[in-house]
Image: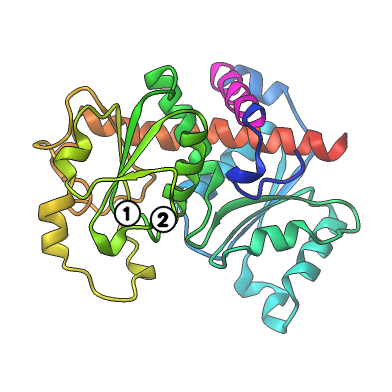
Amino acid sequence: MKNLINIKSLKNDEILEITELAEYYEKNVPQGLHKRKQTGSAALLFFENSTRTRFSFEMASKKLGFDIFNFDAQKSSILKGEGFFDTLNNLNAIGCDIAVIRHSREGFIEELVNKDYAYGLGIINAGEGKSAHPTQALLDFYTLKKHLGDVKGKKIVIVGDIIHSRVAKSNIELLSRFGAHVVCASPDYFEDWSQTNAKYEANINIALKDADAVMGLRIQKERLENQIPLANYIKDYQINETNMPENAILMHPGPVNRDVEISSTLLDSQKGRVIIEQARNGVFVRMAVLDLIYKGLRA
Ligand code: CP
């Protein structure tokens, strides 16, 4: 592994290798981490807002002993007209081994991976437009395995804004490959029929029946082209203490629009704890991804 473009670019055994290494890191916190120093360095280049992904990559890098550099586009030579490839090639020449990139344009990460960097640069997709958020799907898979044992044969219901969600797309790809039954529950204006590995059920109560896990999604106001009937959405699709199945786990990639996709009462109850655990698991999974890519670059 020298890059992480999307879930499609990963083989199943690579996905399992990531989750196994993440488990090693989780079990060896904190004593193992500082001893196991690496010499790599990573640059974080975020062109869209982030809290969880950015901080957990930074935390993961620090725990691995990587040097970490935050790229500030507003203070960089991109504002003097320098292109993205030239920027990355120079960061690589200066000593960055891995670039962790979040960007709004679909296909951008793959284009960058296919360039020829003078000293070899690993690139990790930290969220790309509406299309892919592979490390989120990997940490969701890790979280699901911890709670459900295995996702094979399990019913995972994804509720809400599927069409704008890179998290939903990466999760549908990954979970269906590992034998989960993925059901999407959303109003027609949020459906994405290109996601053929999932079933659709417009009625949330039917969708949630016998679910093993329920994954809420944020309504991505910044990507909406038209207003949506929010009051109706909340009435028909909010996950709350009335419709949440008792035996299912509740997940959400964050950030949560409180009282929109999930009620505050449910979020603040014991059921909401797994959502916070997802953020924690993100550190171990991103440690594993950084470690494997760094080793791949050196091999
Ligand atoms: N889940 C996720 O990508 O959160 P951030 O946008 O805060 O990184």
Inspect the image, locate mark 2, and give the three-letter code of the amino acid beneath it.
Ser
- Relative height, residue 92 to residue 72 (above, below): above
Image coordinates for residue 192, horizontal then vertical, percent: 38, 58
Q: Residue at x 61, y 31 (%)?
A: 15
Q: Is residue 107 magenta?
A: no
Q: Amino acid at mark 1?
A: Arg
Instruction: Report if residue 156 is visible in the image.
Output: yes
User: Badge 2 local density, few (<14 within 10 Å), some, or many (20+)?
Assistant: many
The quadrant of the picture occupied by the C terminus is top right
Range of residues picked out in magenta: 14-28
Residue at the image position 68 percent from the left and 32 percent from the top: 64
Q: Residue at x 59, y 17 (%)?
A: 28
First in residue order: circle 2 vs circle 1: 2
Percent position (x, y) of residue 70? 64, 56
Residue 151 percent coordinates (x, y)? 43, 25
Q: Is mark 1 within 8 Å of ligand 1?
A: no
Q: Which residue occupies the foreground of this view, 212 or 27?
A: 212
